[in-house]
Image: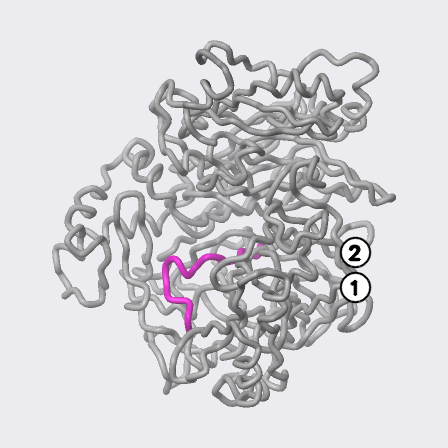
Amino acid sequence: MRRRSVLSLLGFGGVGVLTTKGLSGCVLDGRNISAARDFPFQPVRVPLPVNSDGLNADQQQATYREQVLEDRLTVPEGFRSDLLAAWGDPLGTSRFGYNNDHLGFLQHDPKRASMTVNFEYISAMPWVQGFEEVVGRPLPFAALVSALQPRDGVIDCGALPAGDLLLQQIRVVADEAMTDLGIGVMTLQRDDQGNWTRAQGAQDRRITGISGLEDPLQQLLSSGPATAVFTASNRQGYDDGLGDRIIGTFANCGGGTTPWGTVLSAEENFQSQVPEPVYADGSAAAPSQQPFVCREGKLGGLGNVYGLAGNKYGWMVEVDPMSPDQPVVKHTALGRFRHEAVAVRAEAGKPLQVYSGCDRRGGHLYRFVSADSIETIQDKRNSRLFENGELQVARFHADGSGEWLAVTPEAVVDPFLPSRFSDRGLGCPVELPHRDRNQPGAELFREDSAVEDYCRRFNSLADLYRGEGDALQGAILVDAYLAASAIGATPTARPEDTKIDPITGDLLIAFTSGSPGSSGGADPAVFRGPDGQNSWPNGWVMRLSDSGEKDFTWRMAVTGGTPWAGGLGFTNPDNVALDSQGNLWIVTDRSMKSSAGDVFGNNSCWFVPRNGNGDETAACFATGPMECEVTGVCLDQAEASLFLAVQHPGEVYGTRAKGDDEFQAHDLVDRAGRTFQQLRKVPLGSNWPAQAPGRPPRPGVVAIRRQNGEALLKA
């Protein structure tokens, strides 16, 4: 419930009854602190009872009956957080971009490191509100909204003549937005007290959403089979005239680092800026299929402004942070989909393996296996291994087994059947490549009989896609999500991150939510709630063990949700990290635009200690400011500092004005199973990191460490 009337409903006469005692903690007697003492830090209090709070049932009711959320980054007692960089700060020849996500930390010696930062997307309301103060010049956004109002804020820029005044207005706004997207590399230095701070470095640079638009030397390169698609002389769809070169990168969300010192950046929700559908030969749909959109609180279709080819986005991008003159490369052998996350398994004498996920409802988990083997793990020439290999996709079975399917022309068409959803009460369709192979994109199937007819018409991926040799394989890779769906890959629960366990070599996968959507959902036989629910919105962390060349086993290691429903106290695990001891660090991404997850409060960072008996527990290490996502979790070599990216603070309500709050009522359950009601005061909007009313929120990156400089997990 999100309204001020809850005060009278709960019998509270006014705001004055609220205190902040729940956030500052309460005195624990000796009988009730054992759970809190199990962790190497005092867990940060969250606004709902959790198993790690060290309170008995009566204390939980007393503590959590009233709560006040705060617009700040909260860390454990004895720790500090320092802002390293925020939107608008100078970086290279440009500025630190917007909505920082993955952080690629590479330490070169005890005193110096580089950090590669993804800038994912634009949150229109706070971006527009803060632009002039942050960037230092006005943005003609309101004038553009007014000019486009007769068109409902939508226009195909390709239909406007060169020199058109409206097109010039659009370019000003679009150029600024695209500058705030992409990738940044910054230099960090560590002082004698252990503090990491920004330093000017020769390697500092920006790769933006329009890098190469004006200077061809800044264009990105492509590698692998899809280059044959990009350079084809004849095609079904759109040709941008650039061959195997690419303008910019955007929608950069997850990522990872390689043992040889490069950073991989995942292009995820590119479909917001360019058309996602492609033709059977892998060529792009026309830019007009994703027009430019500019309304109050809405900005999208930016690729339309520049005539970008949609099939050149949605790839894994490799950057060498120490070599600013080396071209950035999109590796097409790893497939095109809504890339989120990347884990690299590199062993001398064996092929390189890369794990990644397609972050959509019903998206798949992929593995790339290089054709050649690694000789020396730290050799930068290993990047060539990304150019040639086999893309595989996971098929999970309910018994905890599974196998990797090759996404190749010979792969047999054998899709997941709609009845596997409907038999469990879910109305999810199955999404497959369009039956009319002269049409780009997908088609939704809701009946098994229609899918069976589809299989009779198309026996293999070679029947669905067009081309010869690399051109055929490239067309399949350009359409990797639909191609994988066609051969029976398991629809999963939005795979958000992948990491290799340093102790066991297992793959850990964060599946952020099992909620179904209009075009797909997760296999309910695999992605089940704690009590067997066929859909579970709170997510999991899965542990996957490769047991052969193509076989694996899996189990759910961590379950999101409230403790009284079988979860660990957080929802929607997003990014994960593992320290050298195999402890798991999780950051969360619950939607701030929906009240469904309000009970969990602000997004947060959690610590899950390594536990051999499978009885997982978790403690909150940090909570973020209002309406933000906490992302990019990583640690330095000494494991004395933890880095977080605070993304989209104030995304829903924008800049917070003094006293702008709402009240929420929540039904909670104490550890004895008794239900009680909580009244919660929630600020609307954000002023982080300035934390002064009226100041615009700015996404930024922080370093967290102990005040005494000791290791994070020192007992």
Residue 380 in view (yes/no): no
The location of residue 250, given as percent across then percent down, is 43, 56
In the image: residue 560, left or right of residue 683: right
Q: Nearer the viewer, residue 298 or 177?
A: 298
In the displayed structure, 690 sits above or below 454; it is above
First to last magenta residue range? 263-277
> In the shown orientation, is residue 610 left or right of residue 127?
right
Residue 661: x, y in percent?
Answer: 41, 23
Residue 491 vertical position relative to residue 26 in the rendered view, above or below: below
In reply to whether residue 268 is colored magenta, the answer given is yes
Snapshot quadrant of residue 707:
top right
Secondary structure type for disc 2: loop
Q: CA distance from mark 1 to mark 2?
A: 21 Å
Q: Secondary structure at mark 1?
A: loop
Residue type for callout 2? Gly
Q: Is residue 298 above or below residue 371?
A: above
Residue at the (61%, 75%) spot, across then down: 388
Residue 480 found in image quarter? bottom right
Instruction: Pinpoint residue 170: horizontal percent, then vertical percent.
Output: 22, 53
**Residue lying farthest right?**
613
Q: Which mark is residue 498?
A: none
Amino acid type at circle 1 is Asp
Q: Which residue is mark 2?
A: 505
Query: Residue at coordinates 59% horizontally, 85% vertically from top-left?
Result: 409
Q: Which residue is mark 1?
A: 399
In the displayed structure, 614 sits above or below 639; it is below
Considering the image in quadrants, where does the C terminus appear?
A: top right
Q: In the figure, is residue 124 to the left or right of 379?
A: left
Residue 648 appears in the picture as rendered? yes
Q: Earlier in the sequence, mark 1 or mark 2?
A: 1
Report the coloring of the rendering.
one colour
Residue found 61% across the figure and 23% down from its top: 80
